[in-house]
Image: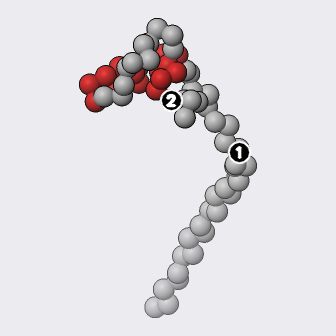
Amino acid sequence: MTHGSYRDVGPHLPSSVEPTVENHWFLRRLKKKKKKKKKKKTKKKKKKKKKKKKKKKKKKKKKK
């Protein structure tokens, strides 16, 4: 649990700080400042070029 836990936010934060509801947002804010989340590289899906099929409107000739 050492990696990414709330305790290793940084040296400026005392280890006695516990995740209470009150300072939870505070810890999260500090964590955000220190660690910039690396964007996970998702596998690039090859974009299939959608060929727009032109619908030919068939004019129905009404037989009189």
Of pointers 1 and 2, the one earlier in the residue sequence: 2
Q: Mark 2 belongs to which amino acid?
A: Ser
x and y percentages locating residue 2 in the rendered image? 56, 29
Q: What is the distance, in whole Å, between disc 1 and disc 2 at their CAs? A: 28 Å
x and y percentages locating residue 54 in the rendered image? 62, 62
x and y percentages locating residue 62 in the rendered image? 48, 86
Instruction: Label 2, secondary structure: give it.
Output: loop
Nearer to the camera, 44 or 21: 21
Residue occupying the point 42% across, 13% down: 14
Indicate whether 12 appears above or below 20.
Answer: above
Nearer to the camera, 10 or 56: 10
Indicate whether 17 appears above or below 3.
Answer: above
Q: Residue furthest front?
A: 16
Which numbered disc covers residue 10? none
Left or right side of 5 for 56 = right
Picture mark count: 2
Indicate whether 57 appears above or below 22.
Answer: below
Residue placed under numbered mark 2 in the picture: 5
Residue occupying the point 50% across, 90% down: 63
Q: Mark 1 belongs to which amino acid?
A: Lys
Question: Based on the displayed image, in which of its 4 quarters is residue 22 positioned?
Answer: top left
Left or right side of 11 for 51 = right
Left or right side of 26 for 46 = right
